[in-house]
Image (cartoon, grey):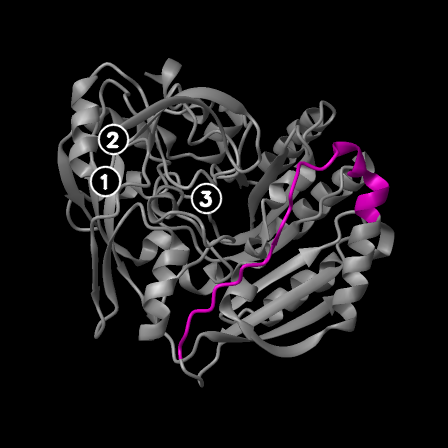
Amino acid sequence: MKRNRTLLHGWGRYPRLHARLSAPANVEELRSLLRGDPAASRIVRGSGLSYGDSSLAADVIGGGGLRQTWELDEETGLLRVSAGFNLREILGEIVAKGWFLPVLPGTSLASLGGAVAADVHGKNHHRDGSFCEHVGELRLMLASGETVTCSPDERPELFRASCGGMGLTGIVLEAELQLARIAGASMLSASLPAANLGQCFDLLEEHEGAQYSVAWLDCLARSAAMGRGTVFLAEHATDGRPHHRRRNGMGVPFTMPGILLNRHSLAGFNSIYFHWQRLRAGNKRQGHDAFFFPLDGIRNWNLLYGREGFLQYQFVLPDAAAREGIRSVLERVSDAGKGSFLSVLKKMGPANGNLLSFPMSGYTLALDFKREASLFPLLDELDALVLDHGGRIYLAKDARMSETVFKKGYPEWERFLEIKRQVDPEFRFRSAQSDRIGLTGAAR
């Protein structure tokens, strides 16, 4: 088994932590690792694409070697697959057979285990819910090395804690997943310009029957144009031979100087992008990778934010408070001059029963910010706005949320801890994030 000392970080490249990284090649090596050092506390890391510190700890287990199981029933679309496969690899095998993953996050490079641990959502949450709502069964390795199965019917409390539980209850070894049938790999998409935030909301609600919907916002536009943007809609094409085409794309060759990102450059980019999208508005056919994963075509795009890295701030607000709350957030961001290249608004469906899952019925907004000292007081202000409007912050994107903000946003945290204590009484699975937000450490 490979073990080495290395500097690790998430996709936002903040924070960074020196860790002892172990890379078990299979389930047996993983079990030996856990039983060989029963006093160690660690967290598992899949593709390392959570933005902050949820996969960081002094000891980290690489999950990429967990790739022993692949069982697809081509008639029913029931897939049993190991946690180490990433979503791109899964799509590459199933699309040609007429099947598709029922929920996709913004990158195809996330691991299956990470998708379960974060209970990721996509552009179809308003219709199809989050990833784990399509998972029928999980096989987990507990801190003791014991392997257990859980599902909505078998050990349901452990299932509800593990789906969205950020790897704190056990290591996902494999999952049974119900795929969605498709007739073709391409997407029929439409882009609709919106002159302001109100129009963005109106268009998303008007087209809530669309299978996939998402809006890009110009977060630096002010006055009557505040929140202007483009709403993107899509459905799977019903004609054409299913196939999976992987884009190679371009890459960012080096870390960009952070000074290039400022209010003026961001405002200029957002303005150009808004007008460019307005000129391109209309219907088109495109590959599914281009619609679901536009940034996967730009390798290492996180380097654009400079060597200090960046933070993504994603929150969700309930329906009744979403318009007012998101407008208040955008006003505060614009006043602070902390613009974002990526300002993404999505309509969400009902919450599920998973204890730490992020979605709730309402709207979610994601904003990217270059890391600098003046950013953190602004994010504290945004936290207060989010809580005042009944919302919460996404754990998979978080790098600095306080314990107070977490516990107010996730009212089931105490029940989660009860279940964790049952399966991991020594709190051997813990991360820098879980210590910071009070789920481990002092909570023990």
Graded by Cα atoms within 10 Å as few (under 14), some (14 to 19) or many (20 or more), the crowding at tag 1 reads some
Quarter of the figure that contains the N terminus: top left
* Coordinates of residue 437 in the picture (x, y in percent): 46, 24
* Coordinates of residue 360 in the picture (x, y in percent): 47, 49
* Residue, disc 1: 157
- What's under tag 1, amino acid-wise? Glu
- What's under tag 3, amino acid-wise? Phe
Q: Secondary structure at mark 2?
A: helix
Proximity of marks 1 and 2: CB atoms separated by less than 8 Å: yes
* Residue, disc 3: 358
Q: Secondary structure at mark 1?
A: helix
Given residues 210 and 182, the one toward you in this image is 182
Q: Is residue 349 left or right of residue 298?
A: left
- Please tell me whether residue 430 is drawn above or below residue 124 in the rendered image: above
* Residue, disc 2: 419
Q: Residue placed at 33% from the left, 65% from the top?
A: 93
Q: Is residue 145 left or right of residue 203?
A: left
